[in-house]
Amino acid sequence: MNARNLTKEGVKSLLEIQHDDRGDHMLWVANNGDIHIDLIPEELSPLDYHEKIEQSLKFRLEVFPCGNQIVGPLAAKDDEWIGKLYKILINNWNADKRGILSVRYK
């Protein structure tokens, strides 16, 4: 999925393949526009993971904490959440934002 041609269905697809109960996740957009939602490996802190992807990173959202239904099949059924993420991603891509973005979750 790429920010240049993102749709709400695309956001839904990104969310539904994740597993909220497996750990914290990071949603980030690469310099080329590719959108990722990654499970942060247990052996890495969010800061360590950020440093690992930093060369490719345009912007990212704050970490999605485990167990809050921010990712996964239930999150993918929440049209309001999908719409909010869609707007965040599109608006920040178009505004050429960089770094860590603060987002108020559901």
Image: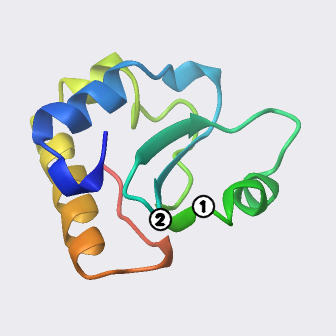
Percent position of residue 1, x then y: 31, 39
Amino acid type, label 2: Asn
In whole angstroms, how far apart are the C-alphas of marks 2 and 1?
6 Å
Percent position of residue 72, x then y: 39, 23
Task: Identify whether 79 is placed above or below 77.
Answer: below
Residue 56's disc number: 1
Q: Earlier in the sequence, mark 2 or mark 1?
A: 2
The residue shown at (22%, 30%) is 12
The residue shown at (46%, 35%) is 68
Residue tagged 2: 31
Q: Residues within 10 Å of mark 1 (few under 14, many from 20)?
A: some
Task: Identify whether 13 is placed above or below 59.
Answer: above
Q: Which of 97 and 47 is in front in this view?
A: 97
The residue shown at (56%, 53%) is 63
The answer to whether residue 57 is left or right of residue 50 is left
Local SS, label 2: loop
Check contact, mark 2 vs mark 1: CB within 8 A. yes
Percent position of residue 44, x then y: 84, 44
